[in-house]
Image (spheres, grey):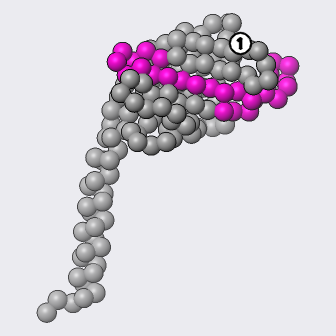
Amino acid sequence: MINPAKALRLSVAGLVVGLAAALPAAAQTGTTYDCRFEVSGAHMGWLPATVILSHTAGETTAQARDPSIEGPEGGPYEVKVETDNAKRTTFTLRRKSKSSTNQPVTVNYRLTVMKADLSATLSAKLLGYTNSYLARGQCERRNG
């Protein structure tokens, strides 16, 4: 006769082992984009030269890293996946910042990766100001 408590422990242990084995497969469904942009003095520090995005298909958010935001805030930050279709993926972020004259400003960032050739555009629009910045670049894609 099987001891019910022992059977339950074995079932739970089997479930944990099964979930642990499935995790690497689930992690491989994600895509990381390592994007480099041509930024100049005209961008006045509003656009980073490098952005790394980690995105899982079907998710409405992604994780991003770049030196300009990561430094002050320490680590990756969440961005919204605005569009994800066969042609492109567009990520957006609204962030409060300070202008060069230390005035508060809200910045809308938008990064679009074209899936066919991995070209990318990065823009920043300062709300309440006429300023907007745009940079073009190239991404490398890593799956898993």
Q: Position of residue 122 (x, y in %)?
A: 56, 19
* Main SS category, magenta section: strand
Total count of labels: 1
What is the quadrant of residue 11 in the picture?
Answer: bottom left
Which class describes the residues within 10 Å of circle 1: few (<14), some (14-19), or many (20+)?
A: few
Amino acid at dot 1 = Met
- Give the SS element for disc 1: loop
Q: Residue furthest left?
A: 1
What is the quadrant of residue 33 in the picture?
Answer: top left
User: Taking 55 as reference, is 41 above or below it?
Assistant: above
What is the quadrant of residue 142 in the picture?
Answer: top left
User: Which residue is drawn at the image coordinates 45% and 35% (left, top)?
Assistant: 54
Image quadrant in which the N terminus is located: bottom left
Inspect this view and state whether residue 142 appears: yes
Horizontal side of residue 1 vs 135, given as left or right: left
User: Which residue is drawn at the image coordinates 17% and 89% (left, top)?
Assistant: 2
User: Which residue is drawn at the image coordinates 74% and 33% (left, top)?
Assistant: 96
Horizontal side of residue 8 vs 46, given as left or right: left
Q: Which residue is mark 1?
A: 44
User: Which residue is drawn at the image coordinates 24% and 76% (left, top)?
Assistant: 10
Q: Is residue 101 magenta?
A: yes
Q: Is residue 134 magenta?
A: no
Image quadrant in which the C terminus is located: top left
User: Taking 32 as reference, is 16 above or below it?
Assistant: below
**Region rendered in magenta:** 94-120
Inspect this view and state whether residue 76 appears: no
Q: Residue furthest bottom?
A: 1
Q: Position of residue 107 (x, y in %)?
A: 70, 27
